[in-house]
Amino acid sequence: MTVMIQRSSIDIFEDSVLVNPWPVYRQLQEQGALVWFDRLNAAAVTRYAECRNILRLPHIFISGKGVGLNDAVNAQSEGSVLGSDEPLHGKLKSVLLERFSPQLSPNSRRKSKIRRML
């Protein structure tokens, strides 16, 4: 599948965009699935389906070399779930999923306990 890269001069960090980003998000989605921001020297995937497909190709779209827009952010996220590739990413993710799965939430434990009592 070929995806056309659209160019944008929008400053997504402009105050008005930060206050109300939804119109700009919609505009970017209408522009295309992949948008190159000239001011940031970076690309963004603007649509759900394409983003989901990219996230399923971690051998092509790597995170271990940084996902931020500058070196300082990338240095801080290095070795985290966000800033890592396999096999480390899978290990870190499994710890998070184990701790934050809906089955382990306090609310679901209460519901389970109530069901057993009934």
Image (spheres, helix red, strand yellow):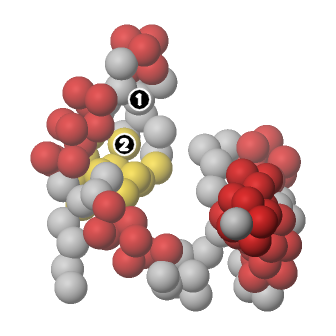
With 108 as the anchor, is 106 left or right in this view? right
In which quarter of the view is residue 91 placed?
bottom right
Q: Report which quarter residue 2 is drawn in.
A: bottom left
First along the sequence among labels 1 and 2: 1
Badge 2 density bin: few <14, some 14–19, many ≥20, Cα 10 Å: some
Quarter of the image with the N terminus is bottom left
From the top left corner, tell me how far across and down residue 32 is, in percent.
18, 55
Q: How many marks?
A: 2
The local crowd at label 1, few if under 14, some if 14 to 19, many if 20 or more residues have their Cα within 10 Å, is some
Q: What kind of residue is marked 1?
A: Ile
Q: Residue at x 40, y 52 (%)?
A: 44
Q: Nearer the viewer, residue 90 or 100?
A: 100
- Residue 111 appears in the rendering: yes
- Check contact, mark 1 vs mark 2: CB within 8 A: yes
Mark linked to residue 12: 1
Judged from the image, the secondary structure of the residue bearing numbered disc 2 is strand
Q: Is residue 82 visible?
A: no
Disc 2 target residue: 37
Q: Which residue type does callout 2 highlight?
A: Phe
Q: Nearer the viewer, residue 95 or 100?
A: 100
Q: Nearer the viewer, mark 1 or mark 2?
A: 1
Q: Position of residue 26 (x, y in %)?
A: 21, 38
Quarter of the image where one finds residue 82: bottom right
- Residue 35, position in %: x, y? 29, 52
The local secondary structure at tag 1 comes to loop
Residue at 18% of width from left, 37% of height from top? 27
